[in-house]
Amino acid sequence: MIKKVFITIIAVLAVALSAMASGDVQQAQALAARLSPQLAQKVQFEAIQDYSGRDVFTLESRDGKVVIGGNNAGSMAVGLNRYLNRYCKVTVSWYADVAVKLPASLPDVPAPERVTARVSQRFFLNYCTWGYTMPFWQWRDWERFIDWMALNGVNLPLAITGQEAVWYNVWTKLGMSDEQVRSYFTGPAYLPWHRMANIDGWCGPLPKEWLTGQTALQQRIVERERALNMRPVLPAFAGHVPGALRTLFPDADIQALGGWAGFDDHYRTYFLNSEDPLYSRIQRLFLEEQTRLFGTDHIYGIDPFNEVDPPSFEPEYLNKVSKHIYESLTAVDPDAEWLQMAWFLYYQRKDYTRERTRAMLTGVPAGKMTMLDYFCEYKEMWREHDGFYGQPFIWCYLGNFGGNTNVQGRVREAGERIERALQECGDNLVGIGSTLEGLDVQQFPYEYILEKAWDFGKAHEQVVNELADRHAGHESQPVREAWKLLYDSVLDISPGNYAAPLPCSYPIMNKETRSIEYDPCQLLAVWDYLLKQDSVTTDAMVIDLLWVGRQLLGDLFQIEKHAFDRAFKLRDKETFFAHSDMLYEILSDLDNLNSHHPHATLGHWLQQARDLGTTPQVKDYYEMNARRLITTWGGGLNDYACRNWNGLVWDYYAKRWENYIREVTVAVFAGKEFDEASYRAATDKFQEKWVTSTSEVVCGTASEDILTHCRRLREKYDFILQTFKCQ
């Protein structure tokens, strides 16, 4: 009898495993078909097992087919990406409107490969990405992006879309009115900072249609992510409550948090003490409602004091906050795990001493709180805090702030730091990921970091050569030389706040606002190598030419602006006007250059915002949010999220420079000093008018292919480029 039961159990398990394997194969096949129907003719998938417990994929040619094996659909997707990158020389864009262009004849795999994951968790995204890139995305955008994450091995994506609908239901159940709740929310582009308890109400109230639309969108997002073997990281209650709740619950321990980023007290946020009985009640209401709408994978992002001061820095208080938050979580979901940004340890490093941090982190049982070490290419906080005092962590590469579009990366250094961390941290290092604040056209740094999570064993030269070849679409020595310079030298840059090129910065007399952190001669050499190609056939190469070219034009603008200011100081009118003309010329050329890629255009950003609205009023409201975020932002964050984009350069940044040049010109003719106050007043007035406008944006256009365009610009500005004093 026992033997029969055992055999029955084994049979049932075998059937279940077979069904799971079949489902994984179907999901991988569907992903490949979404990229290109051509892949279905050449590629097939199969389920394999790896008894080490690690994710694994295999890749080989068999009977005229490319066969990709994997222990789950996510691993199969990584194998597919390996085939596309290395053998087809193709980069899959994370943008839905960029088609995947394959060779006419798909190649075979010359020798079998078997690759295993080095870490179990591969994290991606940042709360801020929902503001700087994704606020107006629809399912088509998300579908490609989820596929891109799968191809690059992500299995732990942040998934915070649609949470306002959950909160709306919670707050109204507790007695708040519709108007109170929607006015508590920020505008859609600013929701990340509301979710992180930085600001309330800014650019609100949130339209009701936003809540219903985002709920349906999140349901599709998490369904697809789970189908591809990802564990979506959903939010939980971290203590942030509406100020209006104090009236409904006058005995509750609700305190104002510290100010944030120059916003006045009207937008300040409030925190409910985790020891208050109301805390556990809200946690239960939220988690039960969220699970009803979106399900759960038992891992929750909780960040109670991100960039704001807690009510107390006393270690005992911090320990109790963590302990009670975790208890409120497990009271609803006994299998709950806490995912916590370590960004606060960098941003508020003077306040979070080792004693305070240890107290906060050890309030949660060991292994139940995973730390995201947020900015490791610059500062590894696990080194500052003894490996997070026993809590596991994920090594993360940030890459950019505010979605800034300049050339930056520190890629090679980041890779070397990952290797050292893997050697030194043992089991405490459970994952590798990226916490980028915004997407840009250049994907390579993030693909590189995520590839480090797999045991490819690539030397630096192989990394560069494979990257260059897939960007060119074929083996190209000039492109290899270009990327070798970028990888070895130019990209040794950590992202910095307000890291925009000068054309996209607020004009200030005798101040460049940023330093050039690389050798401009090397960047010029990169462009020259790229311009040696016979033709451009890939979207990735359009991006490379654009990315490098606009950075060089920004550097030239900085040289011209310095010369313009110097000519004003000397009252050298002839030189002064020559440089003012050149400033306008560079701005025009910069705008035109950006027109070569749709995702380097303001028009695309604004159209996304308007397309999401269902009435003229909501469309205008969304456009205002979109315009404000990337320009004036709010508080003291003007230009924080600046973008080097077609349309934005000429319609916005050039107008600010026009104000600057005009006021300086008036001073030249009047023989007076520059009236900075008058200039700033006029510019600030222009900025606010532009943000609230819905007028058609003036955009430059490119009338030739990008290679011809860049060659012409290279020749046109050669006389200025010589000021770099390159050999």
Image (cartoon, grey):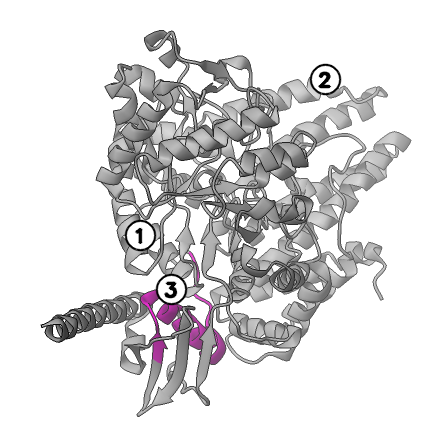
Dot 1 crowding, Cα within 10 Å, few <14, some 14–19, many 20+: few
Identify residue for label 1.
Answer: 140
Residue drawn at x 61%, y 24% is: 313
From which residue to which does the magenta span run? 68-94
In the displayed structure, would residue 433 be above or below residue 216?
below
The answer to which of marks 1 and 3 sits earlier in the sequence is: 3
Q: Is 549 or 249 nearer to us in this picture?
A: 249
Q: Position of residue 722 (x, y in %)?
A: 82, 58
Side (left or right) of 711 relative to 646: right
In the displayed structure, would residue 259 be above or below residue 476?
above
Side (left or right) of 254 relative to 572: left
Q: CA distance from mark 3 to mark 2?
A: 49 Å
Nearer to us: label 1 or label 3 = 1
Residue 80 is a magenta residue: yes
Nearer to us: label 3 or label 2 = 3
- Whether label 1 touches label 2, CB < 8 Å: no
Which amino acid lies under the numbered mark 1 shown in the image of this protein? Arg
Residue drawn at x 50%, y 75% is: 473
Check the picture and name the quadrant holding the N terminus: bottom left
Identify residue for label 3.
Answer: 99
Dot 3 crowding, Cα within 10 Å, few <14, some 14–19, many 20+: few
Q: CA distance from mark 1 to mark 3?
A: 13 Å
Which amino acid lies under the numbered mark 2 shown in the image of this protein? Ala
The answer to which of marks 3 and 2 sits earlier in the sequence is: 3
Q: Position of residue 725 (x, y in %)?
A: 85, 59
Dot 2 crowding, Cα within 10 Å, few <14, some 14–19, many 20+: few
Identify residue for label 2.
Answer: 677
Q: Secondary structure at mark 3?
A: loop
